[in-house]
Amino acid sequence: MESSDIRIDKEGIWYYKGAHMFRKDILCVFFEHLQIDECGKYLIELNEERCYLDVEDTVFVVGAVYKTKLPDDGRYQIDVLLTDDSCEKLEMSSLYIGKENVLYCRVKEGKFAARFSRNSYYQLAEFIEQSENGSHFFINLNDEKYMIKSNQVS
């Protein structure tokens, strides 16, 4: 397979033939038509055309983490801001440590993996606790422990 003209680095920055793609309107169209093929490769499928992407790690990167209190029942949830400028509830059970000890989660209804940026990791780390024997890490939210799995393939 030929290399793609579109590359996404591990920080979620898009490039076309080496030039930084910064136009949000174009990137929004690409995010809306993002797919993963049967081999796990990222592609943009628009009309009858397919364009495969050269992705260093993941297309989605978590840029920020917010803990919010729900007004109806007083419970808390953690939200993540993604590189497509969407904000969604963090699926707590999807947290895992991947290659090079990087933290990941699943986003877009579990369809895609998202890498935590260094800043968003530090934001989430405020809520991470270690088990008494030191062998596991978890987040305690609403009196429920969510274990962070380790060494899962994204």
Image: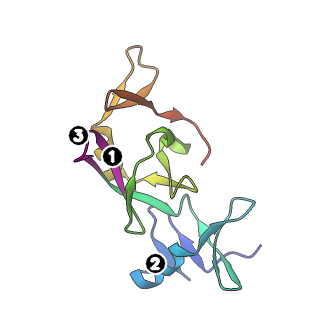
What type is the residue that disc 1 sits on?
Answer: Ile
Q: Residue 50, can we see it?
A: yes
Is 33 above or below relative to 115? below
State whether residue 20 appears in this view.
no
Magenta residues, as a range?
Answer: 66-80
Per the picture, the main secondary structure of the magenta-coloured stretch is: strand
Looking at the image, the residue that sits furthest to the front is: 72
Task: Give the Cα separation between the discs numbered 3 and 2.
Answer: 34 Å
Could you tell whether 90 is left or right of 97 in the image? left
Residue type at numbered disc 3: Gly
* Residue that numbered label 2 is attached to: 28
Counting labels gives 3
The quarter of the image holding the N terminus is bottom right
Disc 1 versus disc 3: distance between alpha carbons?
A: 13 Å
Q: Are marks 1 and 3 in contact (CB under 8 Å)?
A: no
Where in the figure is residue 90, as x and y percent of width and height? 41, 48
Q: Of helix, strand and loop, which one carries label 2?
A: helix
Q: Position of residue 101 (x, y in %)?
A: 49, 40
Question: In the image, is residue 111 above or below residue 21?
Answer: above
Q: Of discs 3 and 2, which sits in the foreground? A: 3
Residue at 59% x, 49% y is 154
Identify the residue at horizontal 61%, vertical 80% (top origin).
5
The amino acid marked with disc number 2 is Cys
Q: Which residue is mark 1?
A: 78
Q: Residue furthest top?
A: 133
* Residue at image location 58% in from the left, 77% down from the top: 6
| Camera-nearest residue between 53 and 141 | 141
Q: Residue at x 62, y 44 (%)?
A: 153
Q: Quadrant of residue 25?
A: bottom left
The answer for how far apart the CA atoms under marks 2 and 1 are is: 24 Å
The disc at residue 74 is: 3
